[in-house]
Image (cartoon, rainbow, N blue to C red):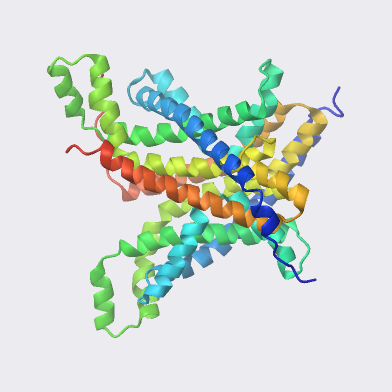
């Protein structure tokens, strides 16, 4: 009935394809993190037009589906005369996308550093960028750690969308193997387990970090 | 070769876009409604249920929140027919989206339930309120109210997430765009238009939720 059975070779094949998921997630994390720093700096910049520019960018990214953003970059590459290629398109889209989310995370952290720190830095004669680099960012970093780890889970899961422009990562490989073996429960069960193994430790770490920043729990009550 | 934009032939097909937008909202609203019910049941079970129920709900929430929606969708779409349940793409899409949102809603509402001081429930009991009354007036309504902003942003994430179901050719905005792209080859223009439509839908929902909160939560705490 099916072309082949779901056995160990298929399992290894799935496991190996997870490295492309991981690679894309790391690219999105590093590139998006760097972009996020720039966007956060713009969001708290002294000039209003810079703040609006960054705000508009974040608003666009957070109000459209990543799949559509991916299609726009993929097919838009023809616009500048390039042949559409899944890897560059996915890498660029995921960096641009996570950059907006990181920008919001970092901005939140920067804004929760007390205003007195800005004033103190100013009175010491530090300029805007120096204040950010030497005074604000080191303090904000600690605050932004829990949501950053939480967002990494989001990145790993979202990379699955890249399969829809033909990038051969974990989800794409799963549909290919499912077509050959026709064992959807085994195939997608295995794939879910692989994603879970990548995401769950990050989720737990994120919650742990959050609890260290957050407050205690209240006592349980019977109903 | 220079790329020449041609929006004309795309925009002429506006009724299809309108239909797609309506389908997207329909998918979002129906899955959100089911997911919300799952969320309330899940949050109550997680906070007040017997230990095995709490554990089971916890496992459900963790599995859904740590795997991609796309894989959940594939699982539902390809596996359920093997178990004898034949679903159309649209039905599979609603089912997967509801299960997905249910887990997030459970987690959000649980935070709401936990934010209710235990003294509140004890006070309701000593006043002689029945279990159903306590659940409704003392737990669920205040809990929903406490986490209303998180619920609405989850709704908007769900709206954006529905674009994923185009992968199994369920009928909505993205799938309609994909079809149109195949017929016209004006992919870039089409996805720009679609992005604008999603943007407008999201802003519109955001606005409605804000207005709604004024009507819904007028009374003082």
Question: Residue A2 at what x, y percent from top left?
Answer: 85, 25
In the rendered image of this protein, does residue B110 appear above or below residue A131? Answer: above
- Residue B72 sits above or below residue A115 on the image: above
Q: Is residue B32 left or right of residue B176?
A: left
Front residue of this view, candidates A145 and B61: B61
Q: Which residue occupies 68% across, 39% down?
A: B167
Could you tell me if residue A90 is visible in this image?
no
Q: Residue at x 47, y 60 (%)?
A: A58
Position in image of residue A73 (x %, y %): 66, 60
Is residue A33 left or right of A105 when viewed as pictured? right
Compared to residue B12, the image places residue A13 above or below, namely above
Residue in the picture at 75% in, 35% down: A11
Query: Which quarter of the picture shows residue A48?
Result: bottom left
Residue extending farthest left: B127
- The N terminus of chain A is located in which quarter? top right
Which of the 4 quarters of the picture holds residue B113?
top left
Which of these two is toward me, A148 or B39? B39
Outermost residue, front direction?
B12
Task: Report x, y in % for residue A62.
Answer: 49, 54
Specify the quadrant of the image occupied by residue B147. Answer: top left
Taking depth in this image into account, of A192 and A108 the one nearest to the observer is A108
Q: Position of residue A8 (x, y in %)?
A: 78, 33
């Amino acid at each position: 009935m099916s072309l082949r059975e779901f056995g160990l070779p298929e399992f290894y094949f799935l496991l190996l394809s997870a490295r492309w998921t991981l690679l894309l997630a790391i690219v999105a994390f590093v590139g998006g993190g760097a972009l996020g720093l720039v966007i956060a700096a713009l969001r708290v910049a002294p000039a209003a037009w810079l703040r609006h520019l960054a705000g508009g960018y974040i608003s666009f990214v957070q109000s459209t589906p990543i799949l559509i953003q991916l299609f726009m970059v993929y097919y838009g590459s023809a616009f500048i005369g390039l042949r559409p290629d899944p890897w560059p398109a996915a890498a660029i889209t995921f960096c641009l996308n996570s950059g907006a989310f990181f920008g919001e995370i970092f901005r939140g952290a920067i804004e929760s550093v007390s205003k007195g720190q800005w004033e103190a830095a100013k009175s010491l004669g530090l300029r805007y960028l120096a204040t950010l680099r030497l005074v604000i960012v080191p303090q904000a970093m600690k605050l932004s750690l829990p949501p950053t780890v939480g967002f990494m889970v989001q990145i790993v899961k979202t990379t699955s969308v890249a399969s829809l422009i033909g990038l051969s990562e974990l989800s794409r490989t799963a549909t290919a193997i499912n077509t050959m073996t026709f064992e959807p429960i085994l195939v997608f069960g295995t794939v879910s387990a692989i994603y879970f193994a990548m995401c769950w430790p990050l989720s737990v770490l994120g919650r742990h970090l959050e609890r260290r920043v957050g407050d205690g729990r209240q006592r349980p009550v019977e109903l | 070769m220079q790329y020449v934009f041609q929006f004309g032939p795309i925009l002429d097909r506006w009724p299809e876009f309108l239909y797609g937008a309506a389908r997207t909202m329909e998918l979002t609203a129906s899955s959100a409604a089911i997911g919300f019910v799952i969320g309330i049941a899940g949050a109550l079970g997680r906070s007040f249920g017997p230990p095995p129920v709490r554990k089971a709900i916890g496992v459900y929430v963790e599995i859904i929140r740590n795997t991609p929606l796309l894989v959940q969708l594939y699982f539902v779409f390809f596996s359920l027919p093997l178990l004898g349940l034949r679903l159309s793409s649209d039905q599979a899409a609603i089912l997967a989206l509801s299960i997905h949102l249910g887990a997030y809603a459970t987690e959000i509402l649980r935070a709401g339930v936990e934010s209710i001081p235990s003294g509140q429930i004890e006070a309701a009991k000593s006043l002689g309120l029945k279990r159903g009354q306590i659940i409704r007036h003392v737990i669920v309504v205040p809990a929903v109210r406490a986490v209303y902003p998180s619920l609405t942003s989850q709704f908007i994430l769900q709206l954006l997430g529905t674009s994923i179901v185009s992968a199994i050719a369920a009928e909505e905005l993205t799938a309609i765009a994909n079809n149109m792209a195949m017929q016209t080859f004006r992919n870039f223009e089409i996805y720009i238009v679609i992005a604008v439509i999603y943007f407008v839908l999201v802003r519109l929902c955001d606005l409605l939720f804000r207005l709604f909160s004024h009507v819904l939560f007028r009374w003082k705490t």
